[in-house]
Each structure stands twice: as structure tokens, then as C-alpha cells.
Image (cartoon, rainbow, N blue to C red):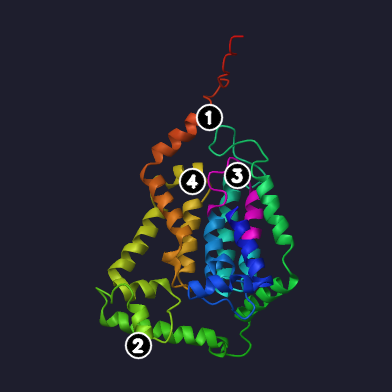
Amino acid sequence: MAVGVTLFGLLLSAAMPELFAAVARLTESRDQFNGRPFGFFMQPNMAAENTIYMSVLWLAGDRQVSVARTWFRVAVMCATVLITGSRSGSAAALLVGLLALLQAGAAAGGECGTTRGPDAPGRGRGGGGDRELGAVLSVLSTSRSGLVAFGLERVRSVLEFSSGNQVSADGSGAERLVAMAQYASFIQQRPLTGYGLGANDHYKLSGLLIRSSHNTYLEAGFLYGLPFVLFWVGLMVAMTRHPARAEVEAVLGPGLVLQLMAALAVTALTSNTTLDSRVLQTGVGAMLGALAFPGRILATRAAARPAPGLAPAVPAPEPA
């Protein structure tokens, strides 16, 4: 549902951006991005990265996990990210999508459309969520060809290197490289403590920084120091290597923790707002809770299933 609402907002902002003008004024945001749809996130790149996080969590806990449903999820994710025109988001979506398909195929025995065994967590009757998937597909089919073409053009510009120096030719890319160099220089001066919360806005207003870093690793190092960055990266690695990860993913979905951490690691390379995402915070918080207390998740799922060989209890009829 969340991905469908996001896609609807993107198409609405592309067709009638004036509807978002009042919100843009209240939040001091832009409502014009050279034709790029921005949706309810009020920014195309933020819409792209949050779409990836929501897509990773889409089938979490779904009772029917199949390669076919994963293919559908990945297709909707990539198409939604593509129409935002986010080049880095499109690359991240392809990487996360490939990882999801490989892990879903391994969990399903490599047979497309199959589900896990009757006694394995996640097995259930087919058809669950089909109406939701159909609604998303219906919204997707209404997207204008111009939006898709625009997204393809943005992606194509990344893949073309015939000019000899494509990054320098792209003004946006060149400015980002300069900004990253500035942030790195400031971090070298205060590597342990950083400059404090809100220092980036102050330095941009004073002209010492030309723009945002577009890199969460540099942004976090600038604000909070390198120890925070090491703690954050260490937490991501610890979550992927947690001994209970296999048990948790058997219940919540194949490769869910690894996909979410991969999405975070990749999107953080080209976005400075990654850690501000409410979707990501909710997902990471849920994964931390599941890894810390895997027994409760397994016990809850076991209680919801009848014991092997026993029929589910049927309530006795009420006396007349």
C-alpha cells in the first residue's frame, strides 16, 4: 500500500505540481524540479530512496513468499524509482532488486512461483495481498510514457562516457564532487568531535559550504565525527552477521535484513538525508528488535500455526 501511495503521489505531482505549492511554501521546499515528479516526499531523490526502503519491507512477514511475487515487487520498485529521474536511486534499486531475486530464488529452491514447505515459516494460502498488488499495477499502468522516458534519459546520462569526462560535463555531478571535497577537508580538521548538529546549515548560510554533501557518510562525519560513522557502519555489519539473522529472515522474509542494510549502505553514498528517513528508522528499529529477541517472533509464529499432525481446534457450538 505504501509503495502504491508513493507512486500515486509521484504521478499527481507530475500532472499537477501546483497542488503541492502551498505545502512547499509551508515547508520551505521547492515544487519545481525540471519536470521530475517529487510526490509526497517533496523531493525526487528522497522519494526514490524511501521507495527502495518500502519495497524491501513490502513482503516482510508475508505468508506467501515466492519468486514470482518478488519479481513483481522488484519491477514496481524499479519502475517507481525510474520515474523520479534519480540516477543514483535507479542504480541502488537495480542492486537491491538483484539481491532480492537471488535470495528469493535460493529460499524457494530456484523454482519461480514456488513457496516454502508446509512446515516452514512463511507458508500460507495463495492470493494474500493480490488486490493490493493489482491496485499498484493499475496505478503503474497509468504512468505517462514521458515520465518513463525522462527517467530512462536520466539513467542513460550516467552510462554514457563518450564525452571523455562525463562527470565534469554534468554540472550537478561536478558540484557534488566539489562539495564532498569541502566536507572531507572540514572532517580532517575535527575528525573526533565533528561540528555539531545543524552546523551544515550554518556553514552553508555563511558561504563556507557551497551545498549539501549528497553523502551520508560525509554528512555524519562532519556533524558528529568519525566515531559516529564507525559505530553506524559497525552496526550495519553486525546486523548482517548476527547469529539469529537466519531465524529472523525465515519468518520475516528471505534476505530481509541483508537487503535493508544493502539499501542503506548504497543510498547513503549519494544522499545526505538517508538517516532522516522515517521509513528506514522504522525498518531498522524493527530489525534490531527482531534480532535481539528472535524467540518471541518464532514463538508468535509457532502459536499461530497448529502443531504438526493436529487439526486446528474447532469451537463447540453454542447451546440452543
Give the mark nearer the N terminus: 2 vs 1.
Answer: 2
Callout 2–callout 1 Cβ contact below 8 Å: no
Give the mark nearer the N terminus: 4 vs 2.
Answer: 2
Of residue 10 and residue 235, the one placed in the foreground of this image is 10
Residue for point 48% across, 29% down: 303
Q: Count up the numbered dots.
A: 4
Residue for point 56% across, 69% down: 89
* Amino acid type at image mark 4: Glu
Tell me if I can see residue 55 in this picture.
yes
Callout 4–callout 2 Cβ contact below 8 Å: no
Magenta region: 57-77
- The reply, left or right, for residue 180 in relation to residue 2 is left
Residue at image mark 2? 206
Rendered position, 47 above or below 245: below
Q: CA distance from mark 4 to mark 2?
A: 48 Å
Residue at image mark 4? 249
